[in-house]
Image (tube, rainbow, N blue to C red):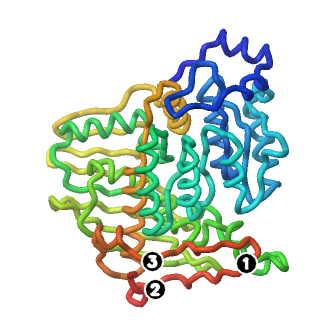
Protein backbone atom coordinates (compact mmCIF):
# COMPACT_ATOMS: atom_id res chain seq x y z
CA UNK A 1 0.00 0.00 0.00
CA UNK A 2 1.39 3.41 -0.98
CA UNK A 3 1.63 5.81 1.92
CA UNK A 4 0.91 9.39 0.83
CA UNK A 5 3.87 11.73 0.96
CA UNK A 6 2.29 14.80 2.49
CA UNK A 7 5.03 17.20 1.37
CA UNK A 8 4.78 16.11 -2.26
CA UNK A 9 0.99 16.15 -2.02
CA UNK A 10 0.90 19.75 -0.78
CA UNK A 11 3.45 20.88 -3.35
CA UNK A 12 1.51 19.15 -6.10
CA UNK A 13 -1.80 20.77 -5.19
CA UNK A 14 -0.23 24.19 -4.54
CA UNK A 15 1.48 24.20 -7.92
CA UNK A 16 -1.65 23.17 -9.81
CA UNK A 17 0.45 20.65 -11.64
CA UNK A 18 -2.31 18.64 -13.26
CA UNK A 19 -1.83 20.10 -16.72
CA UNK A 20 1.90 19.51 -16.73
CA UNK A 21 1.54 15.96 -15.50
CA UNK A 22 -1.11 15.11 -18.05
CA UNK A 23 1.19 16.36 -20.77
CA UNK A 24 3.86 13.86 -19.71
CA UNK A 25 4.83 10.66 -21.45
CA UNK A 26 2.39 7.73 -21.27
CA UNK A 27 3.03 5.03 -18.70
CA UNK A 28 5.22 2.22 -19.94
CA UNK A 29 4.26 -1.36 -19.22
CA UNK A 30 7.40 -1.55 -17.08
CA UNK A 31 5.95 0.81 -14.49
CA UNK A 32 5.23 4.43 -13.64
CA UNK A 33 7.97 6.62 -12.15
CA UNK A 34 7.14 8.36 -8.90
CA UNK A 35 5.47 11.71 -9.54
CA UNK A 36 4.23 10.82 -13.02
CA UNK A 37 0.48 11.09 -13.52
CA UNK A 38 -1.53 7.91 -13.84
CA UNK A 39 -4.55 8.72 -15.99
CA UNK A 40 -7.73 6.87 -15.03
CA UNK A 41 -10.80 6.17 -17.14
CA UNK A 42 -14.12 4.98 -15.70
CA UNK A 43 -16.52 2.81 -17.72
CA UNK A 44 -19.88 2.67 -15.97
CA UNK A 45 -20.87 5.68 -13.87
CA UNK A 46 -23.33 4.08 -11.45
CA UNK A 47 -22.82 3.77 -7.73
CA UNK A 48 -20.14 1.08 -7.85
CA UNK A 49 -18.27 2.83 -10.65
CA UNK A 50 -18.38 6.15 -8.82
CA UNK A 51 -17.01 4.46 -5.71
CA UNK A 52 -14.22 2.77 -7.69
CA UNK A 53 -13.21 6.07 -9.29
CA UNK A 54 -13.02 7.77 -5.89
CA UNK A 55 -10.91 4.92 -4.52
CA UNK A 56 -8.62 5.02 -7.55
CA UNK A 57 -8.00 8.72 -6.99
CA UNK A 58 -7.31 8.12 -3.30
CA UNK A 59 -4.89 5.28 -4.03
CA UNK A 60 -2.07 7.39 -5.45
CA UNK A 61 -0.94 11.00 -5.07
CA UNK A 62 -0.81 11.42 -8.84
CA UNK A 63 -3.77 9.38 -10.08
CA UNK A 64 -6.11 11.61 -12.06
CA UNK A 65 -9.53 10.87 -13.50
CA UNK A 66 -9.42 12.02 -17.13
CA UNK A 67 -12.27 10.22 -18.91
CA UNK A 68 -15.67 8.64 -18.16
CA UNK A 69 -18.09 6.55 -20.20
CA UNK A 70 -21.72 5.56 -19.72
CA UNK A 71 -24.94 5.12 -21.69
CA UNK A 72 -26.40 8.19 -19.96
CA UNK A 73 -25.10 11.75 -19.73
CA UNK A 74 -27.25 12.24 -16.64
CA UNK A 75 -25.37 9.45 -14.85
CA UNK A 76 -22.05 10.93 -15.95
CA UNK A 77 -23.08 14.31 -14.55
CA UNK A 78 -24.23 12.77 -11.26
CA UNK A 79 -21.05 10.70 -10.99
CA UNK A 80 -18.74 13.68 -11.52
CA UNK A 81 -20.75 15.82 -9.11
CA UNK A 82 -20.46 13.13 -6.42
CA UNK A 83 -16.75 12.69 -7.05
CA UNK A 84 -16.08 16.42 -6.79
CA UNK A 85 -17.82 16.45 -3.42
CA UNK A 86 -15.91 13.38 -2.24
CA UNK A 87 -12.55 14.75 -3.34
CA UNK A 88 -13.28 18.16 -1.82
CA UNK A 89 -10.26 20.47 -1.92
CA UNK A 90 -8.42 17.99 -4.15
CA UNK A 91 -11.11 17.91 -6.85
CA UNK A 92 -9.49 20.48 -9.16
CA UNK A 93 -6.28 18.49 -9.36
CA UNK A 94 -7.66 14.96 -9.17
CA UNK A 95 -10.54 15.32 -11.66
CA UNK A 96 -9.71 16.56 -15.15
CA UNK A 97 -12.58 15.29 -17.30
CA UNK A 98 -13.21 17.66 -20.17
CA UNK A 99 -16.54 17.54 -21.98
CA UNK A 100 -14.79 15.89 -24.91
CA UNK A 101 -13.74 13.05 -22.57
CA UNK A 102 -17.30 12.32 -21.41
CA UNK A 103 -18.35 9.52 -23.72
CA UNK A 104 -21.99 8.43 -24.07
CA UNK A 105 -23.44 5.32 -25.70
CA UNK A 106 -22.86 1.61 -26.00
CA UNK A 107 -19.60 2.34 -27.85
CA UNK A 108 -18.44 4.84 -25.24
CA UNK A 109 -15.97 2.33 -23.76
CA UNK A 110 -14.13 2.15 -27.11
CA UNK A 111 -13.72 5.93 -27.17
CA UNK A 112 -12.56 5.99 -23.56
CA UNK A 113 -9.95 3.29 -24.14
CA UNK A 114 -8.65 5.28 -27.12
CA UNK A 115 -8.40 8.47 -25.04
CA UNK A 116 -4.88 7.90 -23.69
CA UNK A 117 -5.83 6.61 -20.26
CA UNK A 118 -3.46 4.31 -18.37
CA UNK A 119 -5.93 2.52 -16.07
CA UNK A 120 -9.46 1.47 -16.98
CA UNK A 121 -12.09 0.83 -14.29
CA UNK A 122 -14.79 -1.54 -15.58
CA UNK A 123 -18.05 -1.17 -13.67
CA UNK A 124 -20.84 -1.68 -16.20
CA UNK A 125 -23.42 -4.49 -16.00
CA UNK A 126 -21.41 -7.74 -16.24
CA UNK A 127 -22.93 -8.82 -19.56
CA UNK A 128 -20.66 -6.26 -21.22
CA UNK A 129 -17.56 -7.16 -19.24
CA UNK A 130 -15.85 -9.79 -21.43
CA UNK A 131 -15.85 -7.44 -24.43
CA UNK A 132 -14.76 -4.41 -22.41
CA UNK A 133 -11.96 -6.32 -20.68
CA UNK A 134 -10.62 -7.71 -23.96
CA UNK A 135 -10.47 -4.28 -25.59
CA UNK A 136 -8.74 -2.75 -22.56
CA UNK A 137 -6.05 -5.44 -22.46
CA UNK A 138 -5.60 -5.38 -26.24
CA UNK A 139 -4.98 -1.64 -25.87
CA UNK A 140 -2.33 -2.18 -23.14
CA UNK A 141 -4.34 -0.75 -20.26
CA UNK A 142 -4.09 -1.75 -16.62
CA UNK A 143 -7.55 -2.78 -15.41
CA UNK A 144 -9.72 -2.86 -12.34
CA UNK A 145 -12.57 -5.22 -13.26
CA UNK A 146 -15.66 -5.50 -11.11
CA UNK A 147 -17.19 -8.89 -10.39
CA UNK A 148 -18.56 -11.08 -11.89
CA UNK A 149 -16.54 -11.24 -15.09
CA UNK A 150 -19.27 -12.66 -17.36
CA UNK A 151 -22.87 -13.89 -17.41
CA UNK A 152 -22.39 -17.08 -19.47
CA UNK A 153 -19.74 -19.74 -20.04
CA UNK A 154 -18.69 -18.41 -23.49
CA UNK A 155 -17.97 -15.12 -21.72
CA UNK A 156 -15.87 -16.89 -19.07
CA UNK A 157 -13.84 -18.66 -21.76
CA UNK A 158 -13.34 -15.36 -23.57
CA UNK A 159 -12.10 -13.79 -20.34
CA UNK A 160 -9.67 -16.66 -19.69
CA UNK A 161 -8.07 -15.94 -23.06
CA UNK A 162 -7.85 -12.27 -22.11
CA UNK A 163 -6.22 -13.19 -18.80
CA UNK A 164 -3.43 -14.97 -20.68
CA UNK A 165 -2.98 -11.90 -22.85
CA UNK A 166 -2.70 -9.65 -19.79
CA UNK A 167 -0.07 -11.92 -18.27
CA UNK A 168 1.96 -11.93 -21.48
CA UNK A 169 1.89 -8.13 -21.54
CA UNK A 170 2.69 -7.77 -17.81
CA UNK A 171 -0.48 -5.75 -17.31
CA UNK A 172 -2.29 -5.45 -14.01
CA UNK A 173 -5.73 -7.04 -13.72
CA UNK A 174 -7.32 -6.56 -10.31
CA UNK A 175 -10.74 -8.10 -9.72
CA UNK A 176 -13.58 -6.65 -7.66
CA UNK A 177 -13.81 -9.71 -5.42
CA UNK A 178 -13.26 -7.38 -2.51
CA UNK A 179 -13.09 -9.99 0.29
CA UNK A 180 -9.76 -11.16 -1.10
CA UNK A 181 -8.45 -7.70 -0.14
CA UNK A 182 -9.99 -7.63 3.37
CA UNK A 183 -7.19 -8.25 5.85
CA UNK A 184 -9.47 -9.81 8.48
CA UNK A 185 -10.76 -12.35 5.94
CA UNK A 186 -7.26 -12.97 4.55
CA UNK A 187 -6.10 -13.74 8.10
CA UNK A 188 -9.07 -16.06 8.62
CA UNK A 189 -8.42 -18.13 5.51
CA UNK A 190 -4.73 -18.26 6.38
CA UNK A 191 -5.77 -19.89 9.67
CA UNK A 192 -8.00 -22.38 7.85
CA UNK A 193 -5.37 -23.25 5.25
CA UNK A 194 -2.81 -23.74 8.02
CA UNK A 195 -4.99 -26.38 9.69
CA UNK A 196 -6.73 -24.42 12.46
CA UNK A 197 -9.97 -26.39 11.97
CA UNK A 198 -8.36 -29.57 10.65
CA UNK A 199 -9.48 -30.97 7.31
CA UNK A 200 -12.34 -29.11 5.69
CA UNK A 201 -15.61 -31.07 5.82
CA UNK A 202 -18.34 -28.63 4.79
CA UNK A 203 -18.90 -24.97 3.93
CA UNK A 204 -22.30 -23.29 4.26
CA UNK A 205 -22.66 -19.75 2.89
CA UNK A 206 -25.74 -17.54 3.12
CA UNK A 207 -26.57 -14.42 1.13
CA UNK A 208 -30.12 -13.52 2.16
CA UNK A 209 -30.98 -9.93 1.31
CA UNK A 210 -33.57 -7.64 -0.29
CA UNK A 211 -33.86 -7.16 -4.06
CA UNK A 212 -31.08 -4.98 -5.40
CA UNK A 213 -33.02 -3.26 -8.18
CA UNK A 214 -36.67 -4.37 -8.32
CA UNK A 215 -38.21 -4.57 -11.78
CA UNK A 216 -40.52 -1.60 -12.40
CA UNK A 217 -44.03 -2.20 -13.79
CA UNK A 218 -44.22 -2.48 -17.58
CA UNK A 219 -46.55 0.55 -17.75
CA UNK A 220 -43.71 2.76 -16.52
CA UNK A 221 -41.68 2.06 -19.66
CA UNK A 222 -41.53 5.30 -21.67
CA UNK A 223 -43.24 5.20 -25.06
CA UNK A 224 -40.80 4.39 -27.83
CA UNK A 225 -38.05 3.07 -25.54
CA UNK A 226 -36.32 0.12 -27.18
CA UNK A 227 -36.02 -3.34 -25.65
CA UNK A 228 -32.26 -2.93 -25.24
CA UNK A 229 -32.52 0.45 -23.52
CA UNK A 230 -35.28 -0.78 -21.20
CA UNK A 231 -33.28 -3.85 -20.26
CA UNK A 232 -30.00 -1.98 -19.74
CA UNK A 233 -31.72 0.60 -17.55
CA UNK A 234 -33.16 -2.29 -15.49
CA UNK A 235 -30.15 -4.53 -15.98
CA UNK A 236 -30.34 -6.39 -12.69
CA UNK A 237 -33.56 -8.12 -13.76
CA UNK A 238 -32.26 -9.72 -16.95
CA UNK A 239 -29.96 -12.73 -16.92
CA UNK A 240 -27.96 -11.69 -19.99
CA UNK A 241 -26.93 -8.50 -18.21
CA UNK A 242 -26.57 -9.59 -14.57
CA UNK A 243 -26.18 -13.38 -14.69
CA UNK A 244 -28.99 -13.68 -12.12
CA UNK A 245 -28.71 -12.93 -8.41
CA UNK A 246 -26.44 -15.87 -7.60
CA UNK A 247 -23.90 -14.72 -10.20
CA UNK A 248 -24.13 -10.97 -9.68
CA UNK A 249 -24.32 -10.72 -5.89
CA UNK A 250 -23.97 -14.10 -4.17
CA UNK A 251 -20.85 -14.63 -6.28
CA UNK A 252 -19.03 -13.06 -3.31
CA UNK A 253 -20.03 -16.10 -1.26
CA UNK A 254 -19.02 -18.40 -4.12
CA UNK A 255 -15.66 -16.66 -4.15
CA UNK A 256 -15.12 -17.38 -0.45
CA UNK A 257 -16.05 -21.01 -1.01
CA UNK A 258 -13.53 -21.18 -3.87
CA UNK A 259 -10.94 -19.53 -1.62
CA UNK A 260 -11.49 -22.09 1.14
CA UNK A 261 -11.05 -24.86 -1.46
CA UNK A 262 -7.78 -23.25 -2.62
CA UNK A 263 -9.47 -22.32 -5.91
CA UNK A 264 -9.76 -25.95 -6.98
CA UNK A 265 -13.05 -26.65 -8.79
CA UNK A 266 -15.80 -28.97 -7.58
CA UNK A 267 -16.73 -32.22 -9.28
CA UNK A 268 -20.41 -31.40 -9.68
CA UNK A 269 -23.38 -29.65 -8.16
CA UNK A 270 -27.15 -29.82 -7.93
CA UNK A 271 -29.32 -26.81 -7.19
CA UNK A 272 -32.83 -25.55 -6.62
CA UNK A 273 -34.27 -22.12 -7.21
CA UNK A 274 -37.11 -20.18 -8.71
CA UNK A 275 -39.21 -17.06 -8.71
CA UNK A 276 -41.39 -16.90 -5.59
CA UNK A 277 -42.52 -13.27 -5.82
CA UNK A 278 -44.02 -12.43 -9.24
CA UNK A 279 -42.37 -9.65 -11.20
CA UNK A 280 -43.69 -8.08 -14.38
CA UNK A 281 -40.86 -8.45 -16.87
CA UNK A 282 -37.35 -9.68 -16.26
CA UNK A 283 -36.34 -13.34 -16.21
CA UNK A 284 -34.27 -13.93 -13.06
CA UNK A 285 -34.89 -16.07 -9.96
CA UNK A 286 -35.29 -14.57 -6.50
CA UNK A 287 -33.79 -17.54 -4.63
CA UNK A 288 -31.22 -20.34 -5.09
CA UNK A 289 -29.66 -23.10 -3.02
CA UNK A 290 -26.76 -25.10 -4.44
CA UNK A 291 -24.95 -28.20 -3.17
CA UNK A 292 -21.38 -28.55 -4.50
CA UNK A 293 -19.42 -31.81 -4.31
CA UNK A 294 -15.60 -31.62 -4.16
CA UNK A 295 -13.13 -34.43 -5.07
CA UNK A 296 -12.40 -35.46 -1.47
CA UNK A 297 -16.07 -35.65 -0.53
CA UNK A 298 -16.19 -32.17 0.99
CA UNK A 299 -19.49 -30.40 0.47
CA UNK A 300 -20.20 -26.71 0.01
CA UNK A 301 -23.68 -25.18 0.20
CA UNK A 302 -24.56 -21.75 -1.14
CA UNK A 303 -27.96 -20.22 -0.41
CA UNK A 304 -29.17 -16.83 -1.56
CA UNK A 305 -32.50 -15.04 -1.58
CA UNK A 306 -33.63 -11.56 -2.65
CA UNK A 307 -37.13 -11.13 -1.24
CA UNK A 308 -38.41 -8.25 0.89
CA UNK A 309 -39.74 -8.87 4.38
CA UNK A 310 -37.62 -11.97 5.03
CA UNK A 311 -34.78 -12.88 7.38
CA UNK A 312 -31.52 -11.44 6.05
CA UNK A 313 -28.03 -12.79 6.63
CA UNK A 314 -24.66 -12.78 4.91
CA UNK A 315 -22.55 -15.36 6.75
CA UNK A 316 -20.15 -18.26 6.29
CA UNK A 317 -20.07 -21.42 8.41
CA UNK A 318 -16.95 -23.50 7.77
CA UNK A 319 -16.74 -26.93 9.41
CA UNK A 320 -13.57 -28.98 9.85
CA UNK A 321 -12.53 -32.21 11.54
CA UNK A 322 -11.09 -30.29 14.50
CA UNK A 323 -13.11 -27.12 14.72
CA UNK A 324 -15.33 -24.58 13.02
CA UNK A 325 -15.03 -21.05 11.66
CA UNK A 326 -17.80 -18.48 11.50
CA UNK A 327 -17.67 -15.32 9.39
CA UNK A 328 -20.39 -12.70 9.56
CA UNK A 329 -22.15 -13.59 12.82
CA UNK A 330 -20.50 -10.93 14.94
CA UNK A 331 -17.98 -8.13 14.43
CA UNK A 332 -15.03 -10.41 13.60
CA UNK A 333 -14.42 -13.92 12.24
CA UNK A 334 -13.81 -16.53 14.91
CA UNK A 335 -12.56 -20.11 15.14
CA UNK A 336 -13.63 -22.60 17.81
CA UNK A 337 -12.53 -26.15 18.54
CA UNK A 338 -8.90 -27.29 18.78
CA UNK A 339 -7.81 -23.73 18.01
CA UNK A 340 -9.41 -20.69 19.64
CA UNK A 341 -8.94 -17.64 17.45
CA UNK A 342 -10.60 -14.32 16.71
CA UNK A 343 -9.38 -11.57 14.43
CA UNK A 344 -8.41 -8.68 16.68
CA UNK A 345 -6.59 -6.26 14.39
CA UNK A 346 -7.80 -3.11 12.67
CA UNK A 347 -9.78 -3.89 9.52
CA UNK A 348 -8.82 -2.37 6.19
CA UNK A 349 -11.32 -0.75 3.86
CA UNK A 350 -11.28 -3.63 1.38
CA UNK A 351 -12.65 -1.52 -1.49
CA UNK A 352 -9.85 0.99 -1.04
CA UNK A 353 -7.27 -1.74 -0.59
CA UNK A 354 -8.02 -3.14 -4.05
CA UNK A 355 -6.98 0.14 -5.60
CA UNK A 356 -4.07 0.72 -3.24
CA UNK A 357 -2.65 -2.62 -4.39
CA UNK A 358 -3.32 -1.89 -8.07
CA UNK A 359 -1.62 1.51 -8.11
CA UNK A 360 1.27 0.32 -5.97
CA UNK A 361 1.81 -2.52 -8.44
CA UNK A 362 1.89 -0.05 -11.33
CA UNK A 363 4.45 2.11 -9.54
CA UNK A 364 6.65 -0.85 -8.56
CA UNK A 365 6.32 -2.70 -11.88
CA UNK A 366 5.14 -5.83 -10.02
CA UNK A 367 1.97 -6.82 -11.90
CA UNK A 368 -1.05 -8.32 -10.15
CA UNK A 369 -3.26 -10.67 -12.14
CA UNK A 370 -6.43 -11.92 -10.41
CA UNK A 371 -7.76 -13.29 -13.68
CA UNK A 372 -7.84 -17.05 -13.15
CA UNK A 373 -9.47 -16.96 -9.74
CA UNK A 374 -12.01 -14.32 -10.77
CA UNK A 375 -13.02 -16.65 -13.62
CA UNK A 376 -13.15 -19.69 -11.31
CA UNK A 377 -15.36 -17.92 -8.78
CA UNK A 378 -17.68 -16.55 -11.45
CA UNK A 379 -18.07 -19.99 -13.04
CA UNK A 380 -18.68 -21.57 -9.63
CA UNK A 381 -21.73 -19.36 -9.12
CA UNK A 382 -22.76 -19.78 -12.75
CA UNK A 383 -22.57 -23.58 -12.40
CA UNK A 384 -25.06 -23.41 -9.55
CA UNK A 385 -27.38 -21.30 -11.69
CA UNK A 386 -27.19 -23.86 -14.51
CA UNK A 387 -28.10 -26.68 -12.11
CA UNK A 388 -31.05 -24.75 -10.65
CA UNK A 389 -32.34 -23.56 -14.04
CA UNK A 390 -32.33 -27.07 -15.54
CA UNK A 391 -32.93 -29.27 -12.50
CA UNK A 392 -29.94 -31.38 -13.54
CA UNK A 393 -26.65 -32.35 -11.91
CA UNK A 394 -23.96 -30.28 -13.60
CA UNK A 395 -20.26 -31.14 -13.65
CA UNK A 396 -17.49 -28.57 -13.68
CA UNK A 397 -16.49 -29.63 -17.20
CA UNK A 398 -20.07 -29.21 -18.41
CA UNK A 399 -20.28 -25.76 -16.90
CA UNK A 400 -16.97 -24.62 -18.38
CA UNK A 401 -17.85 -25.95 -21.84
CA UNK A 402 -21.50 -24.87 -21.87
CA UNK A 403 -22.61 -23.45 -25.21
CA UNK A 404 -25.47 -21.40 -23.77
CA UNK A 405 -24.92 -17.78 -24.77
CA UNK A 406 -27.11 -15.35 -22.88
CA UNK A 407 -25.58 -12.15 -24.23
CA UNK A 408 -26.72 -11.20 -27.74
CA UNK A 409 -23.95 -11.18 -30.35
CA UNK A 410 -25.00 -7.74 -31.62
CA UNK A 411 -26.42 -5.02 -29.40
CA UNK A 412 -28.18 -1.97 -30.86
CA UNK A 413 -29.30 0.68 -28.37
CA UNK A 414 -32.44 1.22 -30.43
CA UNK A 415 -32.92 -2.45 -31.23
CA UNK A 416 -35.23 -5.25 -30.21
CA UNK A 417 -34.23 -8.19 -28.05
CA UNK A 418 -36.75 -10.58 -26.58
CA UNK A 419 -35.25 -12.29 -23.55
CA UNK A 420 -36.00 -15.95 -22.85
CA UNK A 421 -38.74 -16.65 -20.29
CA UNK A 422 -37.86 -17.40 -16.68
CA UNK A 423 -36.31 -20.91 -16.69
CA UNK A 424 -38.34 -23.93 -15.57
CA UNK A 425 -36.41 -26.80 -13.90
CA UNK A 426 -37.04 -30.07 -15.71
CA UNK A 427 -38.14 -28.17 -18.81
CA UNK A 428 -35.24 -25.82 -19.51
CA UNK A 429 -32.47 -27.77 -21.20
CA UNK A 430 -28.77 -27.60 -20.45
CA UNK A 431 -26.82 -26.37 -23.46
* In front: label 1 or label 2: 1
At x 62%, y 77%, the residue is: 282
Q: Earlier in the sequence, mark 1 or mark 2?
A: 1
Q: Residues within 10 Å of mark 1 (few under 14, many from 20)?
A: few
Check residue 203 in the rendering and tell me which mark sits there, or answer none.
Answer: none
At x 48%, y 30%, the residue is: 361
Q: Distance of mark 1 from mark 2, alpha carbons?
A: 27 Å
Disc tally is 3
Query: Horizontal and vertical percent for residue 373?
Result: 37, 50
Check residue 404 in the rendering and tell me which mark sits there, or answer none.
Answer: 3
Q: Earlier in the sequence, mark 1 or mark 3?
A: 3
Instruction: Look at the picture and state if 114 lies above or below 95.
Output: below
Q: Is residue 106 left or right of residue 295?
A: right
* In front: label 3 or label 2: 3
Q: Distance of mark 1 from mark 3, alpha carbons?
A: 22 Å
At x 77%, y 52%, the residue is: 103
Q: Secondary structure at mark 1?
A: loop
Q: Distance of mark 3 from mark 2, alpha carbons?
A: 15 Å
Query: Horizontal and vertical percent for residue 121?
Result: 61, 45
Q: Disc 1 designates what residue? A: 415
Check residue 424 in the rendering and tell me which mark sits there, or answer none.
Answer: 2
Picture quadrant where residue 28 is located: top right
Query: Horizontal and vertical percent for residue 110?
Result: 67, 55
Q: Is residue 207 left or right of residue 395?
A: right
Residue 272 at least partly seen: no
Amino acid sequence: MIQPNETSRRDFFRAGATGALLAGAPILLKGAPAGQAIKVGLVGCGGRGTGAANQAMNADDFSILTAVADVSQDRIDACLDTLRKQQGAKADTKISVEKTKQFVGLDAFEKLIASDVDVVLLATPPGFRPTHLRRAIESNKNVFCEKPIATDAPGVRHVLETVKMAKAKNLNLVAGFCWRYANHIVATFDQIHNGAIGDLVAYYATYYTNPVKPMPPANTRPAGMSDIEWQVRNWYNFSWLCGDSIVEQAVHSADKIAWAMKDQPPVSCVGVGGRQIPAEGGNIYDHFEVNYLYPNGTRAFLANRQIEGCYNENSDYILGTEGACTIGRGPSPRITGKTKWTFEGQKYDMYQKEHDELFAAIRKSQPINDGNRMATSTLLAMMGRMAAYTGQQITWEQALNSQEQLTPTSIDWNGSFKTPPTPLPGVTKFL
